[in-house]
Amino acid sequence: MTTAVDTTTYRDALREALREGLRRDPHVVILGEEVGRYGGAYGVTSGLLDEFGEDRVLDTPISEAGIVGAAVGAALAGLRPVVELMYVDFAALAMDQIVNQAAKARSMFGGQTGVPLVLRTQGGTGRSAGAQHSQSLEAWFLHTPGLRLYVPATVTDAHHLLLAALREPDPVVFVEHKALYTTRSDLGAHAPPPGVSVRRREGRDVTVVTYSRMLHRCLDAAQALAARGVEADVIDLRTLCPLDLEPVVASARRTGRVLIVTEDTLTGGVSAELAARVTELAFDWLEEPPMRLAGEDVPIPVAPALEEASVPTPLRIERAALRLLGRRA
């Protein structure tokens, strides 16, 4: 059982969850490019090879289709693989294995078997990694029935949601934001289960709905709004499948205004689905249609200033909330 500890990083919280999972369940194995001797592209698996050996922490060839395909087969055969894809962008190379094989197995075999696979991957901007290494592609996976989708924003959620993913009987896509690995906070002993949204800040004037790195930017914006007399109710979804909108609807009934903030692109993105559902569920209480603030519909630039301009910033979030309230920015 995890207990509260001194401050730790998002990266270390993930590593400890993997270590706990490996110790608890002999069927858990880790595989991916450079997850062993190098310790993972972002250092999450550092030290696990020495502790658990090459039979359980496997360095693979550079072939995302091969890595995920092998993991699907291993899961069907009784193992519980944890795959690391170095960038979420590289999931494009393994989409058949993810969406046509892993996601469909339980239905295709009449519930007789599933694919208890955890696909850890890294998304988002913040490292000037360019258009092929900086996307937020969670909408791809959200579109596919049969996949669970976890998007932790905090150190505690990174740890506990990964532990929860390691218990799931079906595939989980676990998207870690690459800009969060060095964030530091206390690691709580407990966290709500997947499918439970959490209010991170209480307010009466506007409901702000978000997840992953954008949570931190929304909280910064909420602090700036408070200085102007506006109190934002900030809700962290934590997981997109299962999706818990009850706190969002309850908040919308109080505030009458909902701002949805995501890093993925505006067109066809997660914000579109959330806006549609909020409209359906809370229409009678809304003073204004839900407003979306999302990533620009452009390939992510390399230049730091342009990269930053392509996604919501605290200032843009603050100004969007003020517009929704009919106030000058």
Image (cartoon, rainbow, N blue to C red):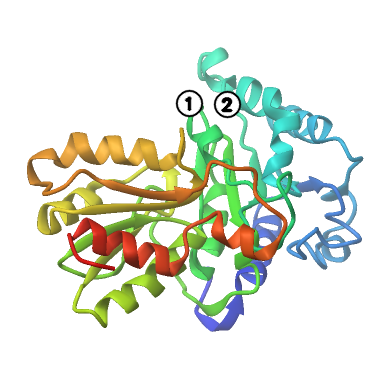
Q: For residue 67, which quarter of the picture? A: top right
Q: Quadrant of residue 40?
A: bottom right
Q: Residue at the spot x=44%, y=56% of the render?
A: 211
Q: Which residue is mark 1?
A: 145
As drawn, 291 above or below 216: above
Residue 103's disc number: 2
Contact, CB < 8 Å: mark 2 with mark 1? yes
* Apparent side of residue 165 relative to residue 301 in the rendered image (left or right): left
Type of the residue with mark 1:
Pro
Amino acid at dot 2: Ala
Numbered disc 1: secondary structure: loop
Q: Residue at x 56, y 63 (%)?
A: 159
Q: Badge 1: how crowded within 10 Å, few (<14), some, or many (20+)?
A: few
Left or right of residue 137, residue 247 in this image: left
Q: Earlier in the sequence, mark 2 or mark 1?
A: 2
Residue 10: image x %, image y %? 60, 69
Counting the numbered discs, the total is: 2
Please provide percent x and percent y for residue 27.
71, 44
